[in-house]
Image: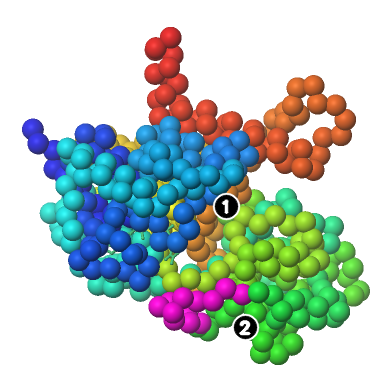
Amino acid sequence: MTTEPIHVIGGGLAGSEAAWQAAQAGVPVILHEMRPVRGTDAHKTDSLAELVCSNSFRSDDAETNAVGLLHAEMRLAGSLIMACGDAHQVPAGGALAVDRDGFSAAVTAKLEAHPLISIAREEVPGLPPAEWDKAIIATGPLTAPSLAQAIAEATGADALAFFDAIAPIVHFDTIDMGTCWFQSRYDKVGPGGTGKDYINCPMDKAQYEAFVQALLDGQKTEFKEWEGTPYFDGCLPIEVMAERGVETLRHGPMKPMGLTNAHNPTVKAYAVVQLRQDNALGTLYNMVGFQTKLKHGEQVRIFRMIPGLENAEFARLGGLHRNTYINSPTLLDGSLQLKSRPGLRFAGQITGCEGYVESAAIGLLAGRFAAAERLGRAPSLPPVTTAFGALLNHITGGHIVSDDEPGKRSFQPMNVNFGLFPPLEAGTNLRPEGFEGRFRGKDKSIARKKAMTGRALTDCRTWLGLNAAAQAAE
Ligand SMILES: Cc1cc2nc3c(=O)[nH]c(=O)nc-3n(C[C@H](O)[C@H](O)[C@H](O)COP(=O)(O)OP(=O)(O)OC[C@H]3O[C@@H](n4cnc5c(N)ncnc54)[C@H](O)[C@@H]3O)c2cc1C
């Protein structure tokens, strides 16, 4: 009996990995890639899995870094992207950087040589036709316009964004709650709220003016010529607001009205920075209205001037880019399937993950899920304690949608980070054997990360059936 193929649209990081995973599971794949018939503004070659900018897959430290952990899990899952990355590694300290041409050529050769994969060099101009009953759209941040238009028509115009407007996200446990306090403006409860939904960071006049000056002086990144300048109402970068006058921010995202400092009720703050819960776990908070084009190093330096954020660790820094991505938490089910059209999945950056490795990881999952269904099995979802599961969970439901800013998109692209993982079980012993003295600060943070990555790798092996296979071999 011949198995019907899965159609993968887009041969980038996600589509290449999805095609590989499905084919390795024994399912035929037709991979549709529009290059070289039609190019994008960023791709320069006709190779599959082209790296459009940096040649780095970031940290390869699987013990204390979330993206390093994702590398390790992808290797366990037989990732083509990781195998070709490892084979074409170039020296880069603790990071995994690759020879970009060697890497992409290797991915292309492996996919071309696979007996179950055919590659069609063509643009798919609209949603897959009905007869493609299992398909994965992995067309990335620069999805060709006619397909993007078709996706917008199918999902609703508000559900597809063409630019991101990313505000920084802070790990809750690095915010000084001795300085900040929980309160919603005017104690409004709102839908699903408590009246204490925001974390507030107070500033006096001198602190505010120094902060505005730092925003003006801070180094910014420029838009690429083809990106245009995507400013629209409600999404101006904070430094652009600061340029409009020293008082502008105090009447915008930093307004102090309706807020009383719980630590110092008689003194009115001159300005207030608000952070709002970002994920259901309550481990991450985003800085409301703080989308920015400041360089990443500058963001860390300047945002740590904010009282209460002096020691903040950032899960994500701000940015504004040309990007195409859907409102996944609303549109997709837990296995990346469009709720309104079962059998059609999305993968890669278009789902709202960010980065080469994350895009490939989501491609890996989509390929496995689609192949399982084609073979008559239910998709097996990775546990949320793994990097795969934490990222998938964030995209498909872990992010909290804000009700109090109608018209604004609160779901913004995200790299994998420890804030997406469920906290360790209460009572987990983090203290390494034989550790003497006070156990806190950096030592404790490293130990916590090691416990999380250890838990993740164990659970990932179980999910992939590798523990059972190892036991059977013993
Ligand atoms: C300018 C720029 C710079 C970036 N720099 C970095 C960086 O330094 N580091 C990092 O980690 N991430 C970076 N990113 C993000 C990066 O694009 C993604 O991380 C990653 O490439 C996304 O993988 P993907 O498979 O989702 O999309 P892509 O890798 O872009 O692959 C999508 C593929 O789909 C094809 N396609 C599009 N529409 C169609 C269609 N209708 N029919 C058929 N094929 C189609 C495209 O030609 C492309 O090959 C950058 C993004 C951009 C736009």
Could you tell me residue 184's position as x and y percent?
70, 68
Marks 2/1: CA–CA distance: 31 Å
Residue extending farthest to the bottom is 245
- Give the quarter the ligand 1 occupies: bottom left
Q: Quadrant of residue 369?
A: top left
* Above or below: residue 22 compared with residue 250: above
Look at the image and say whether residue 190 sits in the magenta stretch: no
Magenta stretch prevailing secondary structure = loop
Q: SS class of the residue under badge 2?
A: helix
What range of the chain is rendered magenta?
A: 220-231
Q: Position of residue 113 (x, y in %)?
A: 20, 40
Hey, what amino acid is under mark 2?
Answer: Val
Q: Which mark is residue 240?
A: 2
Q: Is residue 160 left or right of residue 95?
A: left
Write down the residue under mark 1. Answer: 280
The quadrant where residue 316 appears? bottom right
Using the image, determine if residue 161 lies above or below residue 103.
below
Q: Which image quarter holds the C terminus?
A: top left
Binning the other alpha carbons within 10 Å of mark 1 as few (below 14), some (14 to 19) or many (20 upward) gives: some
State if disc 1 and disc 2 touch (CB < 8 Å): no
Secondary structure at badge 1 equals: loop
Q: Amino acid at mark 1?
A: Ala
**Residue lying at 17% horizontally and 37% vertically, measured from the top left:** 115
Query: According to the image, what is the colour scheme of the structure?
Result: rainbow
